[in-house]
Amino acid sequence: MPALCLYFQVHQPCRLRHYTIFDVNHVHAYEDGGANLEILNKVADQCYLPANRIMLNLIRQHAGQFRIAFSISGILLDQLERHRPDVLESFQALVRTGSVELLCETYYHSLAFLFSLKEFKHQVMLHKKKIQSLFGQTPKTFCHTELIYNNDLAKVVEKMNFKTILAEGADRILAGRSCHALYRPAGCSKLKLLLRDYPFSDDIAFRYSDRKWPEYPLTAGKFAGWLHHTDAADTVINLFMDYETFGEHQSQETGIFDFLKAFPAEILKHPDFCFQTPSEVAATFEPSMSLDIPDFMSWADEDRDLTAWLGNGMQTDAIQTLYKMEPQVYRRNSPQLMDTWRMLQTSDHFYYMCTKWSADGDVHQYFNPYPSPYDAYINYMNILDDFSRQLHKKPSSDKGCNP
Amino acid sequence: MQILMFGWEFPPFVSGGLGTACFGMTRALTDLGHEIVFVLPRTDGDGKPSHVKLVSASGVAVPDRDLEEPSVFQGLSIRSVDSVLRPYLSKGRYRSLLSGSHGSRFLTITGDYGADLISEVVRYGRVAGVIARERPFDVIHAHDWMTVFAGIEARRISGRPLILHIHALEFDRSGENINQDIYDIERYGLEAADHVIAVSHYTKKTMIERYGIDPEKVTVVHNAVTRREAGGIYRVEKDPLQKVVLFLGRITFQKGPDYFIEAAAKVLQEMPEVTFIMAGAGDMMPRMVERVAELGIGSRFHFAGFLKGDDVERVFVLSDLYIMPSVSEPFGISPLEAMLYDVPVIISRQSGVSEVLQHALKVDFWDVHELAGKIMAVLKYPSLAAEMVERSREELKHIRWEHAAEKILSVYNTCLS
């Protein structure tokens, strides 16, 4: 019985305020509260709320046959708790249906795994606890920021007791194998690996409203037909994408919500097809074989590697400068400094510094607050400069920062 | 194709970017097999070899063989025109000036940008008719307002189409305090020309908004930059702690030298070891020297004067950062030249060149605070300068006169068909 597995990434960073060198030593608030709230409201009203409403109706309408998964970053959950409890409540309502699985990721949607294993584990545990406390669910499936993955990550994640992990179905690692099968990560004994079907996922996420695409316009019936005609021996088709696809990357005017409303019924017209969450897929199917992925990959850009965040000297300089501060951050033992340091780890900050000007360039512009990658770097480094000075101040000069 | 070009500058008779642009574009056109006669106000008879046939409009009737050029410059000729002094001009006066000099074949035109420029422009226009009668050509290509009369006169004589190429408008040069005569001549030329080429969308927008020109009539052709033929002649052992920030251009209102100085003062408060160089000359120079003294930054701020040839190369090589804070810059080739020397650049958003550069930092010219912040960032974060330089090398490969020449040719062809 072929399963369709839908996972939506839900995340918004804390964007940084315009911060010049002249602000160093004078201004210690780094977030652009106004812009963050404005974007949060926009995304909430154009995407999260309408999409959640549709999802809830679909789940009710199909009496549990329609099942989905979300990974909601901790840094977004914080913003929702503070500013948009109505949105948080709508996610909670979805989870209460029993048809929604919540995944675990790094709380700050960070790249910590690449620089500090200790910090990575902290952030994963923080996120797990947050999900438990807000939704009463204990995540069993792990997805790294932007689907970054390699063997080492899988081994760590298995040790942390996750049962399933998600990754990109990049051609170079599949080498002719199917992304519709389950795999066992090399070096793991229990963890199961699900791979994103990027052509089908991107049909919705990127091509849906592209008038130059020969398949335009894409209807739910047509798309379901394609899925129904994939190899019957295959087990699972993984459609993973940003939740902001609905109403934001693809605006309401494109008809994306109508597509979403019609999609489950079209899939379920085929009696053999069903929807399953990642954990359910892992419980149903056994891995076909072991998959060895020593090099990092991700779902970002055509390159599907780390170059969207670590592809130039500015990006590596910024992130290395940040992680070098780790010992000092721990020594200071200040929740406020720790929180700021972690907020600065969010991968988006480095994504904005990307200078690969290719077909992917426009994706980097989604909610990008900077006119150029150079401005992104300058702003970030100025803030790091101030933060570093804050870290090295005598603790006694802190007012109310110590625990 | 045979092209009759009218221009006020051509190397070595250059005062600014206009000559540099004319040189690059004509070379690309002649490389494609087209022939260009380039009429200058005057050539002083010591014109270096050129790919165009340089014709001096001053003292006309110079035999071509006296200006024979070696093969590098084959295809282009230059001439000069001599002129009489008249301070200002109205449309009616133009006709009387022109008719008054009727029959004279020996006008004197200095080609200087002075108070008598307009009368020079008129005399230059007069000679254009003489030159246009002398030889066959397919199109007339005139650069900026100084050549408007010449272009129109040549068209009257020959019936060939006139393309007016605008490198700068009166609003760029003078802000709101425009010279009405010059504005009138510009408008007259923009309306009369068969087609107009603008060096940027920025300039095209000014033509539409302030001269009421039909957008359909205007094609944007961005300038490019000519590669150094022998790069890296000057190897300067640089002290990495000695940072040099450069302004190079005319010291006039248009170029925003005052914003450079104000930003320098802010930078020096935080980074007192930085050196600032202002290279160039112009009417704002005395005031700028005074301002530097007033701010008390004279020991870190140097006026290098007007630089030519090797000195330009030397100052680029010495610099860690190039700033173009122009108030209004229709294009602005100099940042591209700085990039050829691996110097990162900060340019004002009020410039045409910012339309083609992605790997430069951009600021609004009036935002001195932001400019100072970015100057410090480039000097302070080596990864930033390194990335800008590396990406700029790539970017420069695509900013070529060959592309500009192809666009210019398609404008010619549209006018001819």
Image (cartoon, coloured by chain):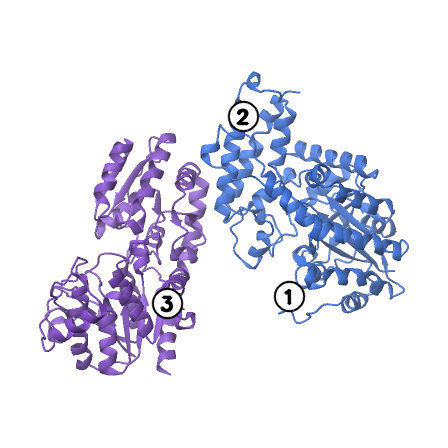
**Image colour assigned to chain A:** blue
Q: Residue at x 52, y 38 (%)?
A: A380
**In the rendered image, which residue does mark 2 sit on?**
A390
- Amino acid type, residue under disc 3 in the picture: Ala
Compared to residue A299, the image places residue B141 above or below, namely below
* Residue B152, above or below B173: below
Distance from the alpha carbon under mark 1 to that under mark 2: 48 Å
Q: Residue at x 80, y 34 (%)?
A: A133
Let me know if marks 1 and 3 both belong to one chain: no
Residue that badge 3 annotates: B404
Chain for mark 3?
A: B
Please tell me how many numbered marks the rendered image carries. 3
Q: Which residue is mark 1?
A: A210
C-alpha gap between disc 1 and disc 3 = 31 Å
Rate crowding at label 3 as few (under 14), some (14 to 19) or many (20 or more) other CA atoms within 10 Å.
many
Q: Where is residue A269? Give x, y as percent.
A: 87, 66
Q: Please, is residue B263 above or below residue A210 in the view?
A: above
Q: Which mark is residue B375?
A: none
Check disc 2 and give the amino acid type. Gln
